[in-house]
């Protein structure tokens, strides 16, 4: 069962830097971040190279493979979150409206992380040709269909822009919590070993002020 301690008493504890998400949630979160960086950089780099070159083929292969991993990581996160995760509550000082915006942003991110790989896979499948996925050659499962492929390509492009906007809001809010509000929200999602090391310069600067 998800452990989310919402009482006022435990919420006070939740603002402490050591009241963090469980290790698996933290690992899956940063794995998703790495995979998303690979997704956007492979797609954007491919736009600037000759589409018939071997580098374009490698970039597309990286995009397809890590895109499928994004979907697997997204499903794993939802299963873990629902059944086993420890989710620290928001700091009591955080206004309700801000909490609602954070939740809507988070669930929209989950939806896009699951839908985006599907529109991507769909646009490849409706080419009507075999393609490589990891060490497997996927046979042509569908007839070539330009109108479906066009629709999926438009959806994929729109999904990528929406994802970028949500990620910007999410990361911007995390930095705002860390640098302006200083309420321990960002530290809850940092790996335990490196949390203090990464924040050392920021903490030292804040202490000096
Ligand atoms: C969260 C996961 C994903 C993200 C963020 C993402 C993002 C992007 C972006 C930004 C583009 C360039 C804009 C566009 O043409 O639409 C793109 C293109 C593309 N994506 Fe994805 N994608 C993801 C998953 C996938 C998956 C799983 C597949 C297929 C298995 C896929 C297949 C494609 C293809 C075929 C293109 C066009 C590449 C080209 O022809 O240059 N994507 N993707």
Image (cartoon, rainbow, N blue to C red):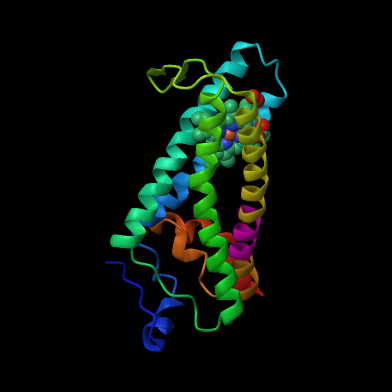
- The C terminus: image quadrant: bottom right
Against 163, residue 122 (above or below) is above
* Viewer-nearest residue: 22 or 95: 95
Relative to 178, 132 lies left or right = left
- Residue at horizontal 39 percent and vertical 52 percent from the top: 77
Q: Which residues are magenta?
A: 167-175
How many marks on residues? 0
Q: Position of residue 29 (x, y in %)?
A: 45, 52
Q: Quadrant of ligand 1?
A: top right
Q: Position of residue 69 (x, y in %)?
A: 43, 37
Residue 113 seen in the figure: yes
Displayed quadrant of residue 79: bottom left
Displayed quadrant of residue 208: bottom right
Q: Main secondary structure of the magenta part?
A: helix
Residue 182 seen in the figure: no
- Residue at horizontal 58 percent and vertical 63 percent from the top: 174
Residue with the most extreme bottom position: 9
* Viewer-nearest residue: 16 or 146: 146
Residue with the most extreme top position: 53
């Amino acid at each position: 069962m998800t452990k989310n301690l919402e009482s006022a008493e435990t919420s006070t504890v939740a603002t402490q830097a050591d009241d963090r998400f469980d290790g698996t949630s933290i690992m899956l979160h940063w794995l998703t971040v790495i995979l998303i960086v690979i997704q956007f950089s492979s797609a954007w780099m491919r736009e600037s190279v000759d589409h018939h070159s071997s580098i374009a083929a490698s970039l597309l292969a990286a995009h397809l493979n890590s895109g499928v991993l994004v979907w697997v990581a997204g499903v794993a996160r939802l299963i873990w979150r629902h059944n086993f995760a420890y989710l620290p509550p928001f700091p009591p000082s955080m206004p309700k409206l801000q909490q609602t915006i954070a939740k809507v942003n988070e669930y929209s991110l989950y939806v896009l992380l699951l839908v985006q790989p599907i529109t991507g896979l769909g646009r490849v499948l409706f080419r009507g040709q075999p393609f490589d996925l990891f060490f497997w050659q996927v046979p042509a499962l569908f007839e070539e269909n330009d109108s479906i492929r066009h629709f999926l390509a438009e959806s994929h492009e729109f999904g990528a822009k929406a994802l970028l906007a949500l990620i910007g809001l999410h990361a911007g809010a995390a930095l705002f919590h860390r640098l302006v509000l200083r309420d321990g929200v960002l530290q809850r999602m940092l790996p335990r070993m490196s949390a203090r090391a990464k924040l050392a310069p920021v903490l030292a600067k804040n202490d000096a002020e």
